[in-house]
Image (cartoon, rainbow, N blue to C red):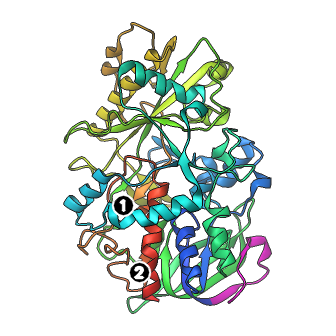
């Protein structure tokens, strides 16, 4: 067995050209779990990661330096019209390095929807053994209510006061110090991210991981991928270093995410039916800030520990949503609102007394909701065209009203909604109807996403889906897609554990194809 390793672009002094059983593009939730399973079976595995390799020694909590290092677009990525900011990891371990540790299995209702509307045969019984194994490896356990910070307790207190559904969250942590800076990497390796778990397992079993390698194309001949071509980047500047990486695998796997993966296939000329990059979903996120007389200090403590699914099902013609809390750190908050100058300074001065709640809309489930499309800009860079449809606009308005009511029920002195027409403040006893008179379309309100799904939808119909139900590409015999891009809708829960379980389940089909 070849010794495994992780090598950065700086360590590659010459071109790389090698063969393997399986080449996986992407080291996040899908790629890392798949690599561990395949390497553990004795297969030779190469993983290519565009981002850098960072460890706990780098995770010093400095937002200004870590967002550029760890996030796509250096932390400033957005949809084509700039209406939705996109927070997505770009580092060894992918988004698992910077996510907020919230862990959910795929809901039964979503799997049933996929069966009924998309012909997908996966069910809870099939995936349960894989979730069980993943949860054991990642120490996914309940986070007790008593450890919830005040920012999360706003959701708990408000829901209890209003009689709304509420529950605590399960997290993939071990020895968590409750620092609250999960979004810029865990400084004590308490977060059981891919870099210290499944990817480490893969390397121990012989997998070779190359970071700072941007895969530009998959070379196809005779209906098969014959080689994977990448260039080596400088870790600090992303400038090409003039060195190439060529991998010649028996099986190629895209685990490059729901934007990067479809873009790779399209750049490689592998979109055979015009469906690659279509039906991309993002759980569009809108937030409400509220002020409390007592300190909230939402910059400390587990970012997410309480959630409400009270409005997850609002009927067949309305988009459901769920309510969570984000961390309340200065840079993240500053870039997620519309105020500047003195107003922004005032906001930051009040940060210790500010609570933030967010609502995530469940896109792709309502009939006719096609989500967004992965495209290329004239300069060749990848972008996501994601329209704010009337159905989504209604969900954004309804969720904003719900979060405002929730904050006031929890004791807030004022709930604040950022809007292009001016900040809206609602106080106890105030009229929520003011929100009904405002538009909630593109660029009207600050929106972001940290959950990008779809773009390479799974399904049995080769005219409608990109991959088969076993995640093998419909038209390229030795190509698999193993990540959240295969989801035909969004999930209505944070997606990481769904991807972990799916990747572990898919490993058998990939191994059999070698």
Which residue is disc 2 drawn over? 509
**In the rendered image of this protein, does residue 503 appear above or below residue 307?**
below
Q: Nearer the viewer, residue 98 or 440?
A: 98
Please, what secondary structure does the residue beneath circle 1 have? loop
**Residue name at image x 31 percent, y 15 percent:** 433
**Residue name at image x 41 percent, y 42 percent:** 284
Magenta includes 461? no
The residue carrying pointer 2 sits among few (fewer than 14), some (14 to 19) or many (20 or more) residues within 10 Å by Cα, namely few
**In the rendered image of this protein, does residue 231 appear above or below residue 87?**
below
Q: Is residue 354 left or right of residue 113?
A: right
Please, what secondary structure does the residue beneath circle 2 have? helix
Residue 427 visible in the picture: yes
What x and y, as percent, mark residue 224? 42, 88
What x and y, as percent, mark residue 48? 61, 74
Which of the 4 image quarters holds residue 469? bottom left
Q: Is residue 273 left or right of residue 69?
A: left
What x and y, as percent, mark residue 131? 46, 61
The disc at residue 487 is: 1
Q: For marks 1 and 2, give the one nearer the viewer.
A: 2
The answer to which of marks 1 and 2 sits earlier in the sequence is 1
């Amino acid at each position: 067995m070849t010794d495994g390793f992780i090598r950065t672009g700086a360590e590659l002094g010459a071109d790389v050209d090698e063969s393997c059983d399986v080449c996986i593009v992407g080291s996040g939730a899908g790629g890392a779990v798949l690599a561990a399973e395949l390497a553990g079976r004795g297969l030779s595995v190469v993983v290519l990661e565009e981002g850098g390799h960072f460890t706990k020694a780098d995770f010093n909590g400095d937002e200004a330096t870590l967002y550029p290092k760890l996030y796509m677009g250096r932390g400033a990525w957005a949809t084509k019209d700039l209406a939705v900011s996109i927070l997505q990891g770009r580092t060894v371990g992918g988004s698992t390095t910077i996510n907020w540790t919230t862990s959910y299995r795929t809901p039964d209702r979503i799997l049933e929807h996929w069966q009924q509307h998309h012909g997908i045969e996966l069910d809870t019984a099939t995936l349960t053994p894989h979730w069980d194994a993943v949860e054991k490896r990642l120490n996914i356990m309940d986070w007790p209510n008593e450890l919830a910070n005040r920012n999360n307790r706003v959701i708990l207190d408000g829901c209890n006061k209003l009689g709304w559904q509420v529950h605590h969250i399960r997290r993939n942590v071990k020895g968590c110090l409750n620092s609250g800076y999960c979004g810029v990497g865990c400084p004590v390796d308490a977060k059981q991210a891919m870099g210290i778990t499944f990817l480490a397992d893969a390397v121990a079993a012989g997998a070779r991981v190359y970071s700072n390698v941007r895969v530009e194309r998959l070379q196809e001949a005779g209906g098969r991928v014959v080689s994977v071509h990448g260039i080596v980047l400088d870790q600090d500047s992303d400038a090409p270093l003039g060195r190439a990486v060529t991998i010649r695998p028996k099986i190629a796997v895209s685990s490059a995410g729901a934007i990067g993966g479809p873009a790779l296939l399209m750049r490689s000329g592998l979109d055979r039916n015009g469906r690659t990059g279509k039906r991309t979903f993002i759980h569009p996120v809108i937030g409400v800030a509220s002020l409390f007389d007592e300190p909230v200090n939402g910059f400390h403590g587990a970012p997410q520990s309480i959630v409400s699914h009270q409005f997850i099902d609002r009927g067949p013609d309305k988009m459901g949503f769920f309510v969570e809390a984000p961390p309340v750190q200065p840079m993240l908050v500053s870039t997620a609102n519309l105020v500047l100058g003195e107003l922004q300074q005032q906001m930051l001065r009040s940060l210790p007394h500010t609570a933030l709640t967010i609502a995530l809309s469940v896109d792709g489930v309502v009939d006719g909701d096609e989500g967004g499309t992965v495209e290329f800009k004239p300069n060749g860079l990848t972008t996501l065209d994601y329209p704010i449809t009337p159905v989504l606009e209604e969900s954004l308005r309804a969720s904003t009203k719900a979060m405002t009511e929730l904050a006031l029920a929890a004791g807030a002195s004022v709930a604040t909604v950022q809007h292009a027409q001016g900040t809206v403040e609602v106080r106890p006893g105030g009229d929520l109807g003011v929100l009904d008179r405002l538009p909630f379309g593109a660029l009207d309100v600050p929106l972001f996403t940290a959950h990008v799904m779809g773009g390479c939808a799974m399904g049995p119909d080769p005219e409608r889906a990109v991959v088969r139900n076993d995640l093998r590409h419909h038209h390229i015999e030795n190509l698999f897609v193993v990540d959240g891009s295969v989801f035909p809708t969004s999930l209505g829960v944070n997606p990481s554990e769904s991807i972990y379980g799916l990747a572990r389940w898919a490993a058998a089909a990939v191994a059999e194809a070698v």
